[in-house]
Image (cartoon, rainbow, N blue to C red):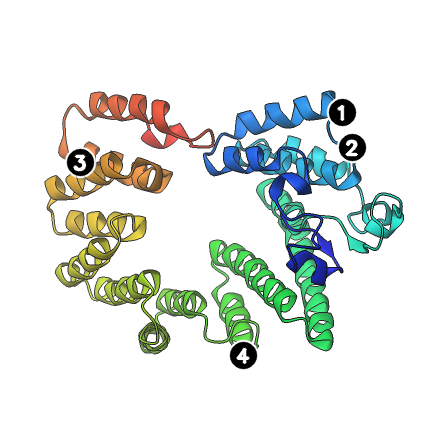
């Protein structure tokens, strides 16, 4: 939720940084952050409403920070029209009223925008959810332009820490754009965007981005191109001991096996991932799918059920539950009762934004 102040040196120095902790940035912000981590989105809405009604938000940046959490919570609860109304209340995010220098008595020696970057991102995302795709994409591409302007400024001033932050932001926004184009099967656009990113210093040889390149190449039937991208990911992985990277390599190998319908080999790759990290949801879900393709419904169901029992907060998402319910429908005559039991358990443990309709009861 970091604001875009140009006083980056102070922000990085805990002795001179006026916002050295979450609660010093905005009142009780650590509590909001904790609620978000736990998926307690309705509690966030209550807390924001209460803080506003009690006039606890004394400075302009307090209001923007709390509004950011409010828009995020509304979006998570799929109340996109309400989220849009909150965003529209701000009008122009680049207005002088959202700059530190407009309030010299409150923010002496500070300049730049106080709009949290994540709020700018939400400003792009909400129209997409309201099926206003052109507006959402226009805002995302304008946000990329803004990020790249900031990158040029940081490069010119040799501010490495700030530069790294903005590089990560560029990658984050571009991944959002690529994800939208991918969801609309605009594969050539995705490939051009990824190749452009990989050619920039901002991402270098980013393993996740390279993997995404390989996935899209598989979608368009370029098996050799995908193998080449995945090979580069393996090269990056060999330089360190990151469990995430090693699992990414094994999941990429499994995808190649899946394309060749070698489900047994794919299962082995996913098992290696799960052995390293028993919370690797993607490996767990895909292993179960492979077992289903091998007509081993009993074991595929056990894989998903065991993951829900062992790490419910990680494994509990709509994709896994949809797959599990599909397997119940294939395996059991009394699948309605089994799904009802699952739905009741989900109601007790799921975060506020979980879509319970995925059980298809």
Q: Is residue 337 above or below residue 223?
A: above
Q: CA distance from mark 3 to mark 2?
A: 58 Å
Residue beneath label 4, please?
199
Q: CA distance from mark 1 to mark 4?
A: 49 Å
Q: Position of residue 3 (x, y in %)?
A: 69, 51
Q: Which numbered mark, 2 or 4, is in the foreground of this view?
A: 2
Q: Residue at image x 15%, y 60%?
A: 268
Q: CA distance from mark 4 to mark 3?
A: 47 Å
Q: Which numbered mark, 1 or 4, is in the foreground of this view?
A: 1
Work out whether mark 3 precedes mark 2 in sequence or the reverse, and give the earlier one. Answer: 2
Label 2 CA crowd tier, 10 Å (few <14, some 14–19, many 20+): few
Q: CA distance from mark 2 to mark 4?
A: 45 Å
Q: Is residue 238 above or below residue 339?
A: below
Left or right: residue 94 versus residue 200 is right
Residue beneath label 2, please?
58
Query: Do the numbered discs 3 and 2 sit on residues whose CB atoms are within 8 Å?
Result: no
Element type at mark 4: loop
Work out whether mark 1 precedes mark 4 in sequence or the reverse, and give the earlier one. Answer: 1
Residue beneath label 3, please?
330
Q: Is residue 310 above or below residue 293?
A: above
Left or right: residue 230 versus residue 104 is left
Query: Do the numbered discs 2 and 1 sit on residues whose CB atoms are within 8 Å?
Result: yes
Front residue of this view, candidates 52 and 292: 52
Image quadrant where one finds the C terminus: top left
Front residue of this view, candidates 224 and 348: 348
Residue beneath label 1, please?
55
Residue 355, image quadrant: top left
């Amino acid at each position: 939720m970091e604001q875009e102040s140009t006083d980056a040196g102070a922000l990085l120095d805990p002795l001179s940084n006026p916002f050295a902790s979450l609660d010093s940035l905005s009142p009780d912000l650590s509590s909001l952050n904790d609620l978000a981590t736990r998926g307690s989105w309705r509690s966030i809405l209550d807390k924001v409403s209460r803080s506003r009604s009690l006039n606890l938000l004394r400075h302009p940046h307090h209001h923007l920070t709390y509004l950011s959490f409010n828009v995020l919570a509304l979006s998570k609860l799929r109340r996109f029209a309400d989220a849009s109304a909150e965003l529209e209340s701000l009008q122009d995010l680049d207005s002088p009223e959202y700059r530190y220098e407009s309030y010299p008595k409150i923010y002496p020696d500070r300049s730049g925008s106080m709009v949290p970057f994540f709020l700018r991102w939400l400003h792009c995302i909400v129209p997409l959810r309201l099926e206003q795709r052109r507006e959402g994409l226009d805002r995302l591409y304008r946000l990329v332009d803004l990020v790249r302007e900031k990158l040029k400024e940081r490069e010119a001033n040799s501010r490495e820490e700030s530069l790294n932050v903005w590089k990560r932001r560029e990658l984050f926004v571009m991944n959002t754009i690529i994800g939208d184009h991918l969801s609309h099967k605009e594969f050539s656009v995705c490939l051009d965007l990824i190749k452009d990113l990989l050619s920039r210093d901002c991402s270098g040889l980013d393993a996740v981005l390279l993997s995404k390149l390989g996935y899209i190449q598989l979608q368009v039937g370029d098996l050799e191109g995908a193998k080449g991208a995945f090979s580069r990911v393996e090269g990056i992985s060999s330089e360190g001991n990151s469990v995430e990277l090693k699992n990414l390599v094994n999941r990429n190998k499994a995808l190649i096996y899946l394309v060749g319908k070698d489900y047994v080999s794919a299962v082995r790759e996913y098992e290696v991932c799960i052995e390293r990290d028993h919370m690797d949801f993607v490996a767990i879900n895909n292993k179960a799918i492979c077992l289903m393709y091998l007509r081993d419904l009993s074991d595929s169901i056990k894989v998903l059920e065991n993951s829900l029992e062992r790490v419910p907060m990680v494994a509990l998402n709509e994709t896994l539950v949809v797959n599990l319910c599909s397997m119940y429908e294939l395996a059991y005559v009394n699948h309605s009762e089994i799904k009802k039991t699952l739905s009741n358990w989900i109601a007790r443990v799921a975060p506020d934004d979980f879509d319970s309709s995925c059980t298809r009861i």
